[in-house]
Image (cartoon, rainbow, N blue to C red):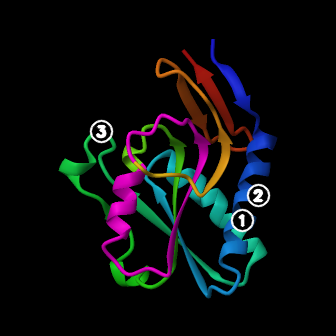
Amino acid sequence: MPNKILSHDQIQHKIRRIAYQIFEANVTAKEIVVAGIDGGGLNFAKKIQKVLQDITEAEITLCTVIMDKSNPLKSGVTTSIAENEYRNKSVVLVDDVLNSGTTLIYGVHHFLKTPLKQLKTAVLVNRNHKKYPVKADYKGISLSTSLQEHVQVEFKTKNDSVYLAE
C-alpha cells in the first residue's frame, strides 16, 4: 500500500511557493517561459503558470517539452513553441519528479543550444538519485528514498497527491 507523502493542500502550497520564487527571480522580466516536460511535468507547469499569471504582469508562456523519457538521446527533444519564442528569455524547465536527472539534463541540454536570459529548473519531488550534474533550482520537497521505492504523482481535479510505494 503506497504512503501518501503530500496532500492536495500541501501540493497547492508548494506550487504557490515555487511560483513566488520564480517571480522573485524574474521580477523585471516581461515574459517568462514555463516549459513543462510532457506528462506530469507539463501538468505541474500548468499549475505554476496559473499562479504566476495571478501574481505578475509578465506574460507567462507555456511550452511543452517532448521527449521519449526512456531514451531521450535517440528520440531527441522538441518543444511546442519555436526556438525564437524562447530565445533571450527567462525559461523555467519543469518536471514532476527528479529521479536520476536523465529527463531534466536532456531538457536543459535542448535549451542551452539557444541564447537565454536565464534557465532554471523546478520539480515537485526531488529524489536525490542523480546520475547527472543537474539540480532543481525550485523544489517542492526533497526525499531520500531507496532505488526500490517509487514516487507517484497524481494531478487530479481538487485531489492532487504524491505517494511513495515499494
Residue situated furthest top in the rendering: 1
The mark that comes first in sequence, 1 or 3, is 1
Q: Are marks 1 and 2 in contact (CB under 8 Å)?
A: yes
Q: Position of residue 34 (x, y in %)?
A: 54, 67
**Residue beneath disc 1:** 21
Q: CA distance from mark 3 to mark 2?
A: 30 Å
Q: Position of residue 115 (x, y in %)?
A: 38, 81
Residue situated furthest front in the rendering: 133
Q: Dot 2: few (<14), some (14–19), or many (≥20) neighbours within 10 Å?
A: some
Is residue 140 depicted above or below 27 in this figure? above
Q: Callout 2, which amino acid? A: Arg
Q: CA distance from mark 1 to mark 3?
A: 30 Å
Q: Quadrant for the C terminus, please.
A: top right
Residue situated furthest left in the rendering: 74
Write down the quadrant of residue 32 in the picture. bottom right
Residue located 25% across and 42% down the image: 71
Is residue 104 depicted above or below 91 in this figure? above
Q: Callout 1, which amino acid? A: Gln
**Residue beneath disc 3:** 70
Residue located 72% across and 84% down the image: 57
- Front position in the image: 6 or 53: 6
- The answer to whether residue 79 of the structure is visible from this angle is no
Q: Is residue 122 magenta?
A: yes
Residue located 50% across and 82% down the image: 117
> Helix or strand or loop: what does disc 1 sit on?
helix
The mark that comes first in sequence, 3 or 2, is 2
Residue interval drawn in magenta = 104-132
Q: Dot 1: few (<14), some (14–19), or many (≥20) neighbours within 10 Å?
A: some
Q: Callout 3, which amino acid? A: Ser
Q: Dot 3: few (<14), some (14–19), or many (≥20) neighbours within 10 Å?
A: few
Can you tell which mark lies on residue 17? Answer: 2
